[in-house]
Amino acid sequence: QVQLVESGGGLVQAGGSLRLSCAASGSIFSRYVMGWYRQAPGKQRELVASITNGGITNYSDSVKGRFTISRDNAKNTVSLEMNSLKPEDTAVYYCKATSIFATTTAYWGQGTQVTVSS
């Protein structure tokens, strides 16, 4: 079992920045690929970015060049630095931990709201 707690969401103007953090506990952090997902009203949840234990990252095309995902394996945290925010980035952002041994074994945080005003 992994418990995930997100923080750092809020209201920001377009062009601004926010940093989301996700603290993990309950299992060996290095055994999980960590990811950030988001879900806007009326839309499906989508992958924003992911990072492996070795630091390999993957980004959705819509955030490439603006968002940066990072992880600190010593502190069991994963962060998402979001720059040049746009109104279309408005969503609930979720942290996800996916086991490297079984992709069907995954855990979600409770989500944090990000609102970008125009």
Image: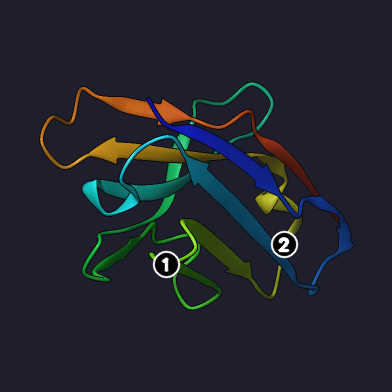
Rendered residue at 66%/52% (across/down): 89
**Can you identify the residue that label 2 sits on?**
86
Q: Position of residue 47 (x, y in %)?
A: 41, 44
Instruction: Tell me how far mark 1 sits from mark 2, CA to CA.
Output: 32 Å
The C terminus appears in which quarter of the rendering?
bottom right
Nearer mark to the viewer, of 1 and 2: 1
29 lies left or right of 31: right
Q: Residues within 10 Å of mark 2 (few under 14, many from 20)?
A: some
Secondary structure of residue under mark 1: loop
The amino acid beneath tag 2 is: Lys
Relative depth, front residue between 22 and 58: 22
Secondary structure of residue under mark 2: loop
Q: Position of residue 34 (x, y in %)?
A: 37, 50
**Can you identify the residue that label 1 sits on?**
74
Q: Dividing the picture into quarters, in which one does residue 20 lie?
A: bottom right
Q: Residues within 10 Å of mark 1 (few under 14, many from 20)?
A: few
107 lies left or right of 116: left
One can see residue 26 in this view: yes
Rendered residue at 35%/38% (across/down): 27
For residue 6, above or below residue 82: above
Q: Dividing the picture into quarters, in which one does residue 92 lie?
A: top right
The amino acid beneath tag 1 is: Ala
Rendered residue at 72%/46% (across/down): 90
N-term mark: 1 or 2: 1
Q: Dividing the picture into quarters, in which one does residue 71 lie?
A: bottom left
